Image (cartoon, helix red, strand yellow):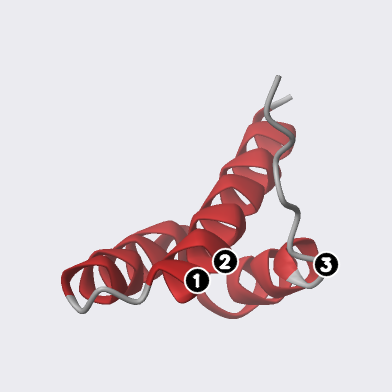
Amino acid sequence: MKKTVRHPEAAREARALVSDHDGHAKAMVEHKLADRLNQGETDEALRLDQVRREIQGVYDRKEE
């Protein structure tokens, strides 16, 4: 089984983005993620994907 690389700052960045941009945080990160993928910046795209996942986790916890 392949181990997922965790970016240590992803959770902190996600919480800050949700705090600053609330409902727009995920869309902002998804837009940046698409841009980085289009530019071939895979390392940054992976980091942003982690941030996106963490943001979704924050939103999911808010709904509970």
Which picture quadrant has residue 17? bottom right
Amino acid carrying mark 1 in the image: Asp
Q: Nearer the viewer, mark 3 or mark 1?
A: 1
Residue at image coords 74%, 64%: 7
Tag 3 secondary structure? loop
Q: CA distance from mark 3 to mark 1?
A: 14 Å
Q: Residues within 10 Å of mark 2 (few under 14, many from 20)?
A: some
> Is 11 drawn above or below residue 64 in the view shown?
below
Residue that mark 1 sits on: 43
Amino acid carrying mark 2 in the image: Arg
Ranked by sequence position, the earlier of labels 3 and 1 is 3
Which picture quadrant has residue 64? top right
Amino acid carrying mark 3 in the image: Pro
Q: Say whether marks 1 and 2 touch (CB < 8 Å).
A: yes
Q: Residue furthest front?
A: 1
Tag 2 secondary structure? helix
Which picture quadrant has residue 15? bottom right
Q: Is residue 59 left or right of residue 29?
A: right
Tag 1 secondary structure? helix
